[in-house]
Amino acid sequence: MIKSPPNHPILNDSASLRSTWAQRAWVACGCTTVLISLAKAIIGAAESHIWFRPILAALAGYILADLGSGVYYWGIYNYGSTSTPIFGAQIDGFQGHHKWPWKITRTQFTNNFHTLARAVTFTVLPMDLANNNPIFHAFVGVFSGCILFSQHFHVWAHTTKSRLPPLVIALQDMGLLLSCQYADHHRPPYNNNYCIVSGLWNKFLDQHVLKALETILFFKLGVRPRSWSEPNSGWTEETKA
């Protein structure tokens, strides 16, 4: 398990690890939109006495959230730069995560995923207002909830089991949440295990999909993914102050 050096300058910069009220507000908004969607799914299913299809939709949302997280983070890790519009800050942040992977375990709760909460709020709120279908909301609620909390599942995968609640450990052991096996992503050649909800799709994506996509993008657009090159200091874990 990845451990952090006790006197690292990043840890001494406590302001960067603390949550702000703006971050807390965005997380509250994101959670509220997800809860509204889930409530609409449950209330609609109860009123119509139709549970099977909403349950299937919820399961699909959970499974596809892991797939979506993997494809998205594969793109963030391998393409673009800090100057890329919209995604530049995330690209910089995730490359920094390779250098200081233990930092997220020391960062306060809402600081870790307020960006996801903002995206969920803007995406899900219009759906909450425009649609009442319980099947639709079962999918949207579970999918967006998993995406919203995926970064915290990621934090748990970097946390020693002695610091995790027993329920989280049980869900990790059952393969329902991302486990510490994700640590392979932080070892050379840094080209696998991108999914951060459950890790269910990692093997399939690593063996059959992502390398093919990288090859297509290279031959069509001439763009090389970062994982094809020798990792530089930005990819190497820093363990000493």
Image: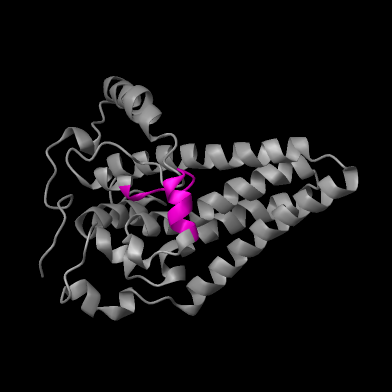
Q: Is residue 28 left or right of residue 177?
A: right
Q: Percent x, y for residue 187?
A: 19, 44
Position of the N terminus, as image quadrant, is bottom left
Q: Percent x, y for residue 155?
A: 38, 59
Q: Is residue 136 left or right of residue 200?
A: right
Q: In the rendered structure, which segment of residues is drawn in magenta? A: 167-180
Q: Quadrant of residue 89?
A: bottom left
Residue at 72 percent across and 58 percent down: it is 36
Q: Is residue 229 left or right of residue 113?
A: left
Q: Percent x, y for residue 38?
A: 71, 53
Residue at 48 percent across and 51 percent down: it is 171
Residue 206 magenta-highlighted: no
Q: Depth check: 75 or 223 in front?
A: 75
Q: Depth check: 64 or 23 in front?
A: 64
Q: Depth check: 20 or 163 in front?
A: 163
Residue at 43 percent across and 56 percent down: it is 169
Position of the C terminus, as image quadrant, is bottom left
Q: Percent x, y for residue 156?
A: 39, 58
